[in-house]
């Protein structure tokens, strides 16, 4: 969560108090070193107001179910990220992750279980990526991972963790993935998604999940 609101609100309030103290010193001779209790209270109130602003900004870019970033985050931040990567001549990977046969999970186990699966999968992916990586909920059961690099080893770790999650929830959970690299595969976010989507489709299993409870 950014500190923009808290810093701005507290800074403006401190500046106002300082101006008032200078005015009181010049015209009434009050010492500059004395900070009245009311001034401390006002700074605290300004900080609290700034905190609420920061929370609103933070959650406006988050998906309410999975706490992943949402499309608003993409529109605001990804163009800036791509411009920075291009300027620094760095590389960037985009992985498109899709829960296989998620509709079958909803139909067999109910939407409450489906929501739990999405939350658990999102938490699992976040636990296996860097803090600097961005995980985005792109659609119903689709996630996008934006990272400097992701390869077979990283995806294998996620798949292994998914196997453990399947045992925990007693539901078969599989994720198909496709990767696109900037600038080798494409130079825009939209085209990177197209490349990753094609790779993901090719990797998807052609069989549907069993309509039975997962046996482990």
Image (cartoon, rainbow, N blue to C red):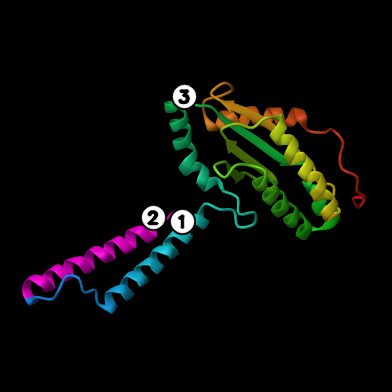
Q: Is residue 113 above or below residue 197?
A: below
Labelled pair 2, 1 in contact (Cβ < 8 Å)? yes
Category of crowding for the residue at label 3, using alpha-carbon neighbours closer than 10 angstroms: few (below 14), some (14–19), many (at least 20): few
Q: Which residues are magenta?
A: 1-27
Q: CA distance from mark 2 to mark 3?
A: 29 Å
Tag 2 residue: 4
Tag 3 residue: 89
Residue 57's disc number? 1
**Quick one: 50 or 108, which is closer to the camera?**
50
Q: Secondary structure at mark 3?
A: loop
Please name the residue shown 21% across and 74% down the image.
34
Residue 128's disc number? none
Category of crowding for the residue at label 1, using alpha-carbon neighbours closer than 10 angstroms: few (below 14), some (14–19), many (at least 20): some
Q: Residue furthest top?
A: 184
Labelled pair 3, 1 in contact (Cβ < 8 Å)? no
The reply, left or right, for residue 200 in relation to residue 106 is: left
Q: Is residue 92 above or below residue 109?
A: above
Image coordinates of residue 91 in percent, x first then y, are 53, 27
Q: CA distance from mark 3 to mark 1?
A: 30 Å
Please name the residue shown 77% across and 30% down the image.
203
């Amino acid at each position: 969560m950014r500190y923009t609101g808290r810093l701005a609100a507290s800074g403006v309030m401190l500046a106002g108090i300082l101006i008032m103290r200078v005015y009181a010193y010049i015209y009434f001779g009050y010492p500059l070193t004395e900070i009245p209790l009311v001034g401390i209270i006002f700074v605290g109130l300004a900080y609290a107001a700034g905190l609420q602003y920061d929370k609103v900004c933070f959650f406006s870019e988050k998906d309410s179910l999975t706490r992943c970033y949402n499309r608003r985050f993409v529109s605001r931040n990804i163009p800036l990220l791509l411009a920075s990567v291009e300027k620094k001549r760095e590389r960037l990977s985009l992985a498109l992750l899709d829960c296989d046969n998620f509709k079958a999970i909803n139909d067999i186990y109910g939407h409450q279980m489906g929501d739990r699966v999405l939350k658990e999968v999102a938490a699992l992916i976040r636990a296996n990526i860097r803090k600097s990586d961005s995980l985005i909920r792109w659609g119903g059961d689709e996630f996008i991972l934006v990272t400097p690099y992701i390869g077979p080893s990283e995806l294998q770790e996620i798949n292994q963790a998914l196997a453990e999650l399947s045992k925990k929830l007693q539901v078969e959970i599989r994720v198909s993935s496709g990767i696109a690299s900037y600038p080798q595969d494409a130079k825009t976010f939209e085209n990177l998604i197209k490349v990753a989507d094609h790779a993901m489709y090719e990797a998807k299993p052609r069989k549907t999940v069993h309509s039975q409870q997962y046996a482990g």
